[in-house]
Image: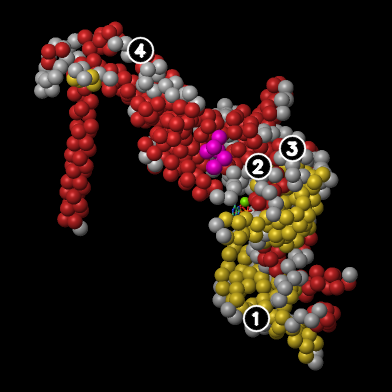
Amino acid sequence: MRFESRASNLKELILSGLIYFVVATLIFVILLPIAWIVVTSFKPEPIVKQPYIWVFTPTLENYWHIFKIRPIWKPLFDTSIIAVSTSLLSLALGTPAAYALARYEFRGRDDLAFWILTFWMSPPVAFVIPLFIIFDQLRLLDTHIALIITHTLANLPFVIWLMREYINDVPREIEEAALIDGYSDIQVFFRVTLPLIKPGLMAVGILAFIFSWIEFLYALIFTSINVRMLTVEVTSYWTIAGVILGPMTAAIVISLIPAVIFAFILQRHIIRGLTLGAVRGG
Amino acid sequence: MADVKLVNLTKIFESRGERVVAVDHINLYVKDREFLVLLGPSGCGKTTTLRMIAGLEVPTEGEIYIGDKLVNDLHPKDRDVSMVFQNYALYPHLTVFDNIAFPLKIRKYPKEEIRRRVEEVAELLRIKHLLGRKPKELSGGEQQRVALGRAIVRRPKVFLMDEPLSNLDAKLRILMRAELKKLQKELGVTTIYVTHDQVEAMTMADRIAVMNEGRLMQVGTPQELFNRPANIFVAGFIGAPPMNFFECEVKEYEDGYYFESEVFKYRISEALGKLVSRLGISRVIMGIRPHDVKVSRGPIENSIKAETYVVEPLGTETILDFKLGANIVKAVVPPTMRIEPGEEVWLVFEEDRLHIFDKKTGKSIYVLAGSEEH
Ligand SMILES: Nc1ncnc2c1ncn2[C@@H]1O[C@H](COP(=O)(O)OP(=O)(O)OP(=O)(O)O)[C@@H](O)[C@H]1O
Ligand SMILES: [Mg+2]
């Protein structure tokens, strides 16, 4: 018995050591390029293309470049408009849809829900050409609206799917109590259900925001001069004359900041959202 | 103020090809101001019935009237009922005060009146000190009283209560039963009250409707149900300890009629024998309540010999278990009667204390004889 338990302790020790090793390796592999980009963005011009130099006197000249010489303000503004609009529109359309799928019994409901989810699994490239033709006909190419529509469409499947989970976590009886207490169906949705899924709205809204913020393919194809997303802007430092590495890395760092901030907020809300189930009475 | 009428009310759930008949053609009339208890075992369709009356579930068939008005197509908010949910369904984001005030706020009562009423109700339910808390900071019993408060703060046409006291400790439950019953009589609000606790049903109800497997088994005052159960189910469900049952064959000999079981022969009166044979019943279930079983230390006429098996003194009375063949018979006797396990006794069943049911249909022969007259 004792021997056995000691053996299993040893096994556990090796196993957890192994897990730590794998996780550490993964983090290293993922973070190294980012660390390298951050470091490079502070390098002075002469050494900017020498990746092995890690110790130097940092400079802000690359940031000066992207804010003064080739202003990043416009892409930053465009991206913010599009990401915020996408996030709000996705929630505004997705939440009622999710509510219907969660709360109303109708024929083929589960099939419909799954069908919606399959769009999430399909490759974005498949939609590029039809959407391009549509936007062209509607004179919407190179506008904010084109990207807001596209990003919202791309987001809706997972917004609906996730919001449905959050809504399912709200006991039906709480809504029914409100119906009996005197609310109409619409009032119940806005005054009872929505307040209860607020953590879900936050989490899913942030996910949609991040998705839009980092989206590249649609941005590259549907917009060019009038509207410029950060992801596209960053590639513009890749010129015929070569890669302008300093300002490019600085632009990447700037574009990373909101995504990182929101990722941290998201982490907190996902944990909060999952405990929503605990509000159940009895 | 209103009466409630259910006509052929039926609910069939269909999910993934499975059909569950939750409520099966119920006909029930609840009088204005009445306290009606829906009593039945778990899963018999009590909650489903309440939910249909409240408008939360669409009946598969049948009609619901509240005060002469057909309400089948009426939205829950327009039916003017209030409901206590079996699992409370409190609003988790609101305080206890706001939970109870909720239905009044929706109906735009003046602020001052809302405060007064909520405090009144909180006082009655002994939760005044909890008004500032959120539901998740309350115990189960406290949450349940908040749910009850939210229902009784209003003066609707009908109160619907789904086991509203199930989570209270014994002492508080007895107190709340009395308070609730008193309040209901004061307010005169028609009440349909669900429970599976027969003591609660007996003590609170004006009338009890007993349900089993979606069907209504009997409706009547507690006394009627206790004294004249219409079928074996009601007979076995009401009363504690439960009624003793024996399966007997009806035999006619030269000296009269007998109920014959595997272990005893019990002589019955001419009148009873004639009644049973006229109804064409050959096998009966004979029932007698433990309180009605007489215990004798010596053999007397038409008594049945049995062996004492278990003795449970409860103080005010003593429960005795006797072995009768393979059956156990329970009797309740005064504590002054001292009997030891293993002792031989003779059991006397008085005929006017017997409940007799047709083995085939489970119906009481008095019901059968009664319906024969019409
Ligand atoms: N939404 C539903 N879908 C399918 N079957 C259901 C549904 N709701 C209830 N049932 C079934 O209907 C029957 C009656 O349920 P109901 O909740 O009315 O019982 P109950 O008498 O309230 O029981 P309890 O005392 O345990 O609360 C049960 O067999 C139950 O499984
Ligand atoms: Mg129930």
Does the magenta run of residues contain A232? no
Q: Cα distance, mark 2 to mark 4?
A: 58 Å
Residue B360 in view (yes/no): yes
Say which element carries label 3: helix
- For disc 1, the chain is B
> Mark 3 or mark 2, which is nearer the start of the sequence?
3
Q: Amino acid at mark 3?
A: Asp
**Could you tell me which residue is drawn at 78 percent across and 65 percent down?**
B228
Q: Cα distance, mark 2 to mark 3?
A: 17 Å
**Extent of the magenta region:** A96-102
Q: Circle 4 is placed at which residue position?
A: A73
Q: Position of residue B352 (x, y in %)?
A: 79, 72
Q: Do the residues indicated by labels 2 and 4 lie within the same chain of the protein?
A: no
Q: Tell me the quarter of the picture where residue A87 sits.
A: top left
Q: Position of residue A220 (x, y in %)?
A: 35, 26
Q: Circle 3 is placed at which residue position?
A: B78
Q: Nearer the viewer, mark 3 or mark 1?
A: 3
Q: Circle 2 is placed at which residue position?
A: B84
Ligand 2 lies under 8 Å from the Cβ of mark 2: no
Q: Cα distance, mark 2 to mark 1?
A: 51 Å
Q: For the C terminus of chain A, give its image quadrant.
A: top right
The image's mark for residue B109 is: none
**Could you tell me which residue is drawn at 66 percent across and 37 percent down?**
A179
Q: Tell me the quarter of the picture where residue A132 sits.
A: top left
- Magenta stretch: dominant secondary structure: helix
